[in-house]
Amino acid sequence: MIDMQTNFELRPVELTSLLRRAKILEHNRVDSLEMIKQDYPGLTSQIFRIIPTYENQDTIAPTSFILKVSHTDKRSRVLSNHLFDNESRFYEHLSPIIRIKTPDYYSGVNNCATRNLSFLLLEDLSSAEVLEENCSCTDLSSTVQEVAKLHAQFLQYGSGKTNSWLHRNLYSVPGERSLHRLLDREIITDDFRTVLLQVIKKRDQIFDKLKHLPRTIIHGDFRSDNVVIREAGGKRSVCILDWQMVRFGHGLADISHFMSSTFSSETRRLYETDFLTEYHKVLKAFTGYSPKKSDYLRHYKLSTLLEIIRILHGARYLIGINASGSILQKGIYRLQLAMKRSLTAIKDHNSLALV
Ligand SMILES: Nc1ncnc2c1ncn2[C@@H]1O[C@H](COP(=O)(O)OP(=O)(O)O)[C@@H](O)[C@H]1O
Ligand SMILES: [Mg+2]
């Protein structure tokens, strides 16, 4: 089915069989299809929009799909395999039970174990708007409420045997030698290096202060690029995409990542406290969990420190994959913006003084 060298091609007969397996087509079949590569410089995958023509056009089958395909370049694929595997498992095991809106999952092939190409066939939400920093406060606040619902659903879910594939560790630190090799790279700024080393030194104390927070299933890469807003019948609703980093963790990890990766520092300062209050209101409504405001503000400030370790992973990944041209440039731009914003958040909150 798949050209392993450079191109990915899905033929009508293959789409027919995927849709039959998904019980979307029974006797009908796909006659032809248009495969449009999305103008999205992805670091972990390629996105295609698939527009099929059915033999019998009188059908309620979807008129388009999104196909998310792992990298055709082998080295990049091997490096991002664990992420693709994670997302495939999410769609297979968690998306059927999750109560927030995610793209409908139709079918997929998970070849991550054999390092061959894998893909996911998903609902096409291209008509929805991607969330942006300058969206209305209502959309931003609905987005925070939505992630709170995810956290509420799985709060104290424990490490249930059925989801033993879910990772637990978002903040592992590379060994001494690879860490220093990484920190010597040009894309790591001096300010970032200094704060990162302080955070690593105090890592155990930070974890200790956060260890009693309830654990739940978190999105893991909760930022505006991974959120779309749909409008139907005058009602706007949030849909969360990109589940490659889904795992167990404490919910504030999603919130601090969202705040520092979505917003400029000025906007973050404007919304931060209100959104944290909003977030905890939803948690309380769904689960009864209701920490004191002074406690959750302190925990949030501590979470901003851990965000620095996450950014380090991003840098490591960017250096490792075979990115070039505009993909690499966009990656570096985003990475350096994340470093700057996170450092400002840490400074604003004087977070290092808490440990
Ligand atoms: N189901 C979907 N419907 C519409 N657009 C999508 C869908 N999935 C992904 N996209 C678009 O493609 C982009 C990249 O997809 P994403 O799943 O976030 O991949 P990556 O893991 O590479 O970031 C998204 O930001 C979004 O613009
Ligand atoms: Mg994404």
Image (cartoon, grey):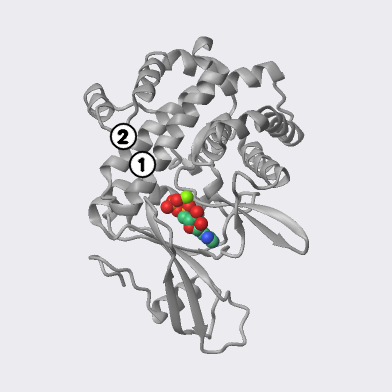
Front-most of residues 85 and 281: 281
Q: Specify the amino acid type for callout 1.
A: Ile
The residue that appears at 53% across and 49% down in the rendered structure is 226
Q: Specify the amino acid type for callout 2.
A: Ile
Front-most of residues 192 and 214: 192
The residue that label 2 is drawn on is 187
Q: Is 195 on the left-hand or right-hand side of 157?
A: left
Sequence-wise first label, 1 or 2: 2
The residue that appears at 49% across and 74% down in the rendered structure is 19
Q: Residues within 10 Å of mark 2 (few under 14, many from 20)?
A: some
Q: Tag 1, which secondary structure?
A: helix
- Labels 1 & 2 near each other (Cβ < 8 A): yes
Q: Which mark is residue 332?
A: 1
The vertical placement of 313 against 210, above or below, is below
The vertical placement of 198 against 272, above or below, is above
The vertical placement of 245 against 9, above or below, is above
Q: Is 74 on the left-hand or right-hand side of 104?
A: left
The residue that appears at 43% across and 71% down in the rendered structure is 36
Q: Which of the image's four quarters has the N terminus? A: bottom left
The answer to which quarter of the image holds residue 213 is top right
The vertical placement of 281 against 322, above or below, is above
Query: What is the x, y in percent for residue 301?
Result: 57, 21
Q: Tag 2, which secondary structure?
A: loop
Q: Which mark is residue 165?
A: none
Q: Residues within 10 Å of mark 1 (few under 14, many from 20)?
A: some
The answer to which quarter of the image holds residue 188 is top left
Front-most of residues 20 and 230: 230
